[in-house]
Amino acid sequence: MNFRKVYEEFILTLRNMRPDVIIHNPVMFLTEMSLFISVFIYLFPGFFGVPSTSTYLQFYLAVVILLFLTVFFSSMSTAMSEGKSRAITDSLKKFKTEVVAHVVRGDGTVEVKSTDLRKGDIIIVYRDEIIPIDGEVVEGSGYVDESNVTGESRAVMKVIGDTVTGSTRLITDRIKIRATADPGSTFIDKMIELVNRATRERTPNEIALTVFLSGLTLIFLIITASIFSISHYYGRTANVMMLIVLLIALIPTTIGALLPAIGIAAINKVSEYNIIAKSGRAIENAGDIDTIILDKTGTITIGERQAVRMYPNKGVDEKEFYRMCALASFYDQTKEGISILNLAKSNGISVSDDDLKGYRFIPFSSETKYSGIELENDYVIKGSLRALKEKFHVADEFIEALCKEISMRGGTAIPVVHNGKFAGVIELQDLIKPGIKERISEIRNMDIKTVMCTGDDEVTAQYISAQVGLDEYIANSKPIDKYNVVIREKERQRMVAMVGDGTNDAPALAKADVGLAMNNGTQAAKEAANMIDLDSNPTKLMDVIFLGKQILITRGALTTFSIANDISKYFVIIPAIFYMFPSLSLVNVLDLTDPIVAVTSALIFNTIIIVFLIPLALGGVKYKPTSISDLLKRNIMIYGLGGVVVPFIAIKLIYMLLVALGVVW
């Protein structure tokens, strides 16, 4: 047992019991005020005009203890959730490391402390060195160990244009990065800030439920207070302590005690998936998603397209075509470009800087959809068939048929144009992720529409869509298309979720109700999204949706159970408190003959049920993808009916145990 953790949670529990803290939870605030009044009644019974015999004083003391435990257990459930959030924050703080950075100054470098770096600084990172600050790779490539941030032990290949996170380690080669943040504003700093802020925010549904519970509590407070007048009308003197017990039994203390813990647990559960949520609202939105927008690459497919074969056009020498492909990809630092070079090398073709003297490299962009080299009228360009046809006004039935054939088997065709003619086609293959078809099926079972956006042509998009069972696809997709899909779906009053990693995804991520950005994505994408996946695994979006559903179901299930068991307690408390009215004996279905012991039994149950439900509040109700109507039926049967039956059985057993122990007041 971690005694330090237990001690910290105990202190946090006591802090949460302070009136200025607990006042944000109206139900538990009223319970704590009732506790204070009960203490005064126990100490000064004559002042309140209540019986002060030894028997009654023992009862008053029991009420004080049980009310204290009720407030304590409620604060403890919140403290346990907050303690987990603090552990996440502490673990993130440990990653922050001050190191010496090699900053480029003129033709040389100077050594600067990482705390003195500034955004825009160019830094050289050598093998086995800690990356001093968040940045973007501007030169070189190498494998980076990100296990301290993502938990993934496998090193990640970083090439030009990729982002790197401060405090991770470069384990191969040498890279040059441009700092994209100032000290104190790095990714880890922002994550610490997000986790701290997330623990204090409440979601709209939680606020709405709190308002409902507050209204219900106010109604029962008025009803309880009016009993004074009713008692006076019948010539009776109401026992204030009994009225306090009645009030605590009437108000929804169970869900009131657990509601804050459920909200904080949502943030913690997301972190278990190695996802940082900027607010609880994002998780809550995930539970209401109607449309999910998916990228093909990295989400539906593995995401690392590899060159597997090169097809020269008629009349083009095979070795010469391999050489063209290698030349066009020599300066291409994307994973696809590197794989083309490797394939050419495996076929005996190697190129060097000398072969490219005077040539200008044309980098790939999402708008042009091609890359390559050119020198005056000599050029080799590779890219999408559509882009090359529009750019160079070329056509070739053989090449088009070959591209279609590759697309029909799920591959990506990269035609190559050399000086105004198609020289051949490079085939890239990106396999469908294992289990993705089942995940898509689960999503559709929840009545969630799936839309795939891909830059591939119509044939490839249709093939992939049919393979995994998507509802809709958008081929030849450009960045603006994702944004337009988000707008279109929201205009149809649908909640939209999407995943992205590029700067061009930022508008759609910001507009979507749930935007999940990849940790290895651009800074703009991470700032626009309301969730960040530290593992950079796009399929996590589906996990987030399942988790959002689970959080909503957990809150609904516990609310249903709480209100249901309150109904059961009425059948115990009301006939016990108003025992002087024989007509109420009809509702004494448990046949509890001693009114004070019956009240004590109900109060004990009211206290201990919170303890039993804390694991459910923190862990969540088990969720299985199904329709809304089936979920509603399941909730009513298990938590509605169970909430009515369980208190009857439990209170009767507690009553019998108290009587067996000789507690007869």
Image: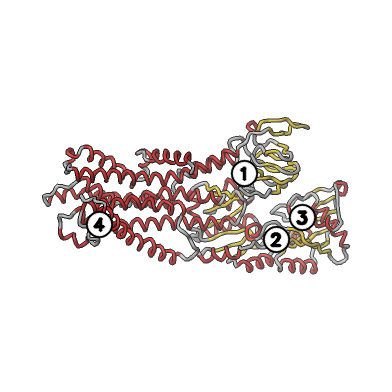
Disc number at residue 119?
Answer: none
Q: Earlier in the sequence, mark 2 or mark 3?
A: 3
Give the residue number, with chain letter if any, for mark 4: 572
The quarter of the picture where residue 399 lies is bottom right
Say what secondary structure mark 2 lies in: loop
Amino acid type at mark 2: Asp
Q: Are marks 4 and 2 in contact (CB under 8 Å)?
A: no
Q: Earlier in the sequence, mark 4 or mark 3?
A: 3
Disc 2 crowd rating (10 Å Cα; few below 14, some 14-19, many 20+) is some
Which type of secondary structure does the marked residue at label 3 adopt? helix
- Tell me which label, 2 or 1, sits earlier in the chain: 1
**Sequence-earlier tag: 4 or 1:** 1
Q: Earlier in the sequence, mark 4 or mark 2?
A: 2
**Residue type at tag 3:** Ser
Identify the residue at horizontal 57%, vertical 52% (top origin): 516
How far apart are labels 2 and 1 at the CA level?
A: 29 Å
The relative height of residue 500 versus residue 109 in the rendered view (above or below) is below
Tell me how far mark 4 sits from mark 2, CA to CA: 65 Å
Q: Earlier in the sequence, mark 3 or mark 1?
A: 1
Name the residue carrying label 3: 339
Which residue is drawn at the image coordinates 64% and 42% (left, top)? 165
Nearer the camera: disc 4 or disc 2:
4
Which kind of residue does numbered mark 1 sit on? Asn
In the picture of the structure, the residue carrying the numbered disc 1 is 148
Residue 569 spot, x, y in % from top left: 28, 56
What's the residue type where badge 4 is placed? Val
- Determine which residue is flagged by label 2: 430
Helix, strand or loop status at disc 4? helix
In three-dimensional space, the C-alpha distance between marks 2 and 3, rounded to whole angstroms, equals 12 Å
| Scheme by which the image is coloured | secondary structure
